[in-house]
Amino acid sequence: MKKGSHKYIFVIGGVMSGVGKGIAVSSIGKILQGRGFRVNAVKVDPYLNVDAGTMNPTEHGEVFVLSSGLECDQDMGNYERFMELPLGPDDYVTSGMVYRYVIEKERNLGYKGKCVEAMPHIIDEITRRFKKAAEASGSDVSIIEIGGTVGDYQNIMFIEAARVLNLKNPDDVIFVIVSYLPVPGTLGEMKTRPTQTAVRMLNSYGVQPDIIIARSAVPLDQKRKEKIAISCNVYADNVISAPDIESVYDVPLNFEKDKMGDLLLKTLKLKTRVKKDGLGPWRSFVSRIKSSVEEVNIAIIGKYFDTGDFILSDAYVSVIEAVKYSAYKVGKKPKLVWLNAKDFESGSKSVSELKQYDGVIVPGGFGESGIEGKLKVIQYARENKIPYFGLCYGMQLMVVEYARNILGLKDANTTEIDPATPYPIIDIMPDQKKNLEEGKYGATMRLGSYKAVLKQKTIAREAYFADEITERHRHRYEVNPAYVAKIEEAGLVFSGTSPDNVLMEIAELPRVIHPFFLGTQFHPEFLARPLTPHPLFTEFIKAAVENSTINKKKKE
Ligand code: GLN
């Protein structure tokens, strides 16, 4: 693409949040990739946190980690999964980052004595970041999601930056609003007024949307399309119907039913670069989802579930998606159940209930609550040969359980929970200890991609079919090197270690002892993709399927 013609698509929410803006962005990216374009996706989070690392997952959902180690919003995970694309550290922008940069620059006399103001300095800094993200990725088109909804106080600066960018490059910038059309039960009719109001509000900022994505429970009829078109100043063809559907992976294909790809190219003044349908592999993936009927039952034992009267699985979205991809790969329908670790801890649920599941996952976590419950679950899975997959905390606790019950080290623990334990099986490394003593919590964990080497003839080595791997991390504590030899003597194998052999990356029991009892210090779920499922998740699912077959035979 010739210089200066980089394209930007700004995606803004109207009416209310939570209607799938992130999936819309991911799907737009997928469609453009299918037409032969290189894309990058940027998430703008208007909060003042510098990154998502310090936020509570129950309230904000999963913290997704990039290769670079940047801790971001879970939407970044959706982008990476749909577009099978590693995003860079410039692809995430928060108000915290922007303000911090501008204030530090001011302190260093970077503005040469000028009065530093929101306009132009904050706006310029936002635009600089958008351009930098585009350059760093080498993409043709940037899709930029502005978090929040039109009318929020917090995102005004970002919409303003987008407006100015459009003013300077009118041929290269378009706006998409993802709106919501309610169908109130008492009326039984779809209402367009909230969308009209949202678009008017956007107009009042000097921005006219080019495309309106109309999210609703049901498809939009032609009459409503036309009504929105005339009142919101767009063509009826620029209103895309986006009804609720069973699987988010259907969204790009559904958009295409309303000719989203052609519309995007026309609005961006681009010509397709491919002759045939570039979404072929995606279509096969989606049809595999539909043709997988036989279930594989997986229990996820977590604690970031309860928000008032609702159970939210948002905190584990990457884990859930990783399980799905591997299940579909082996032709099974994933059935996931969330169990609260605290129920096992209090005894209100018995671990023997786990018998009904084909496999059990203990995902990442922090702090004390639910820990003894998780340890009970792990012991039960180990003793009853239920496939077990431990992710980060789930691996650390698997090693603690082994130390307590096989090595007989009573009260063995992680020093995260019990700093005075006689057996600190999981311990904090000296540099991390210093961070905590100095109260430095933000972006100081062991974060992002690290290499690990794999041991021959282990489940891990067979699954990856490689001697060396790179995986993403997010933790402070590690298996204590002082106990490694003892634990290995007792039969647990550290099948993956850091290249210098100091940090334990994967623990497993040999297959002759247990069909799948494996934990990773890293987070494999961050690298699972629809078309390329993660090898360890696939191995786990295969063991779970095998277990379910055995279970069924036993029942017969
Ligand atoms: N709390 C543990 C640690 O900090 C595990 C973190 C995690 O599961 N992501 O090391």
Image (cartoon, rainbow, N blue to C red):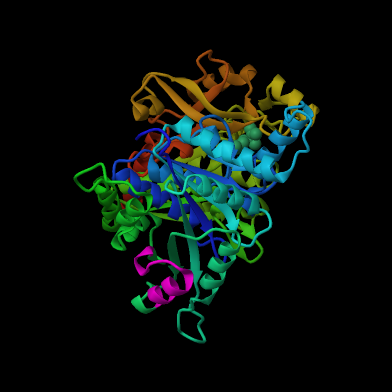
**Nearer-the-camera pick, 498 or 256:** 256
Q: Residue furthest bottom?
A: 186
Residue 325 vs residue 487: left or right? Answer: left
- Which quadrant, please, contains the C terminus? bottom left
Magenta highlight on residue 228: yes
Res. 306 image quadrant:
bottom right
Where is residue 259 drawn, in percent x and y?
A: 30, 60
- Which quadrant, please, contains the N terminus? top left
Question: As displayed, is residue 325 above or below residue 104?
Answer: below
Where is residue 543 drawn, in percent x and y?
A: 36, 41
Residue 85 vs residue 447: left or right? Answer: left
Residue 314 vs residue 441: left or right? Answer: left
The boundaries of the magenta stretch are: 224-238
Where is residue 535 drawn, in percent x and y?
A: 37, 34
Residue drawn at point x = 63 percent, y = 55 percent:
343
Can I make out residue 66 in this image?
Answer: no
Residue 83 vs residue 382: left or right? Answer: left
Q: Quadrant of ligand 1?
A: top right
Question: As displayed, is residue 114 above or below residue 200?
Answer: above
Can I make out residue 326 in this image?
Answer: yes
Res. 115 image quadrant:
top right
Where is residue 180 drawn, in percent x and y?
A: 50, 68
Residue drawn at point x = 38 percent, y = 73 percent:
220
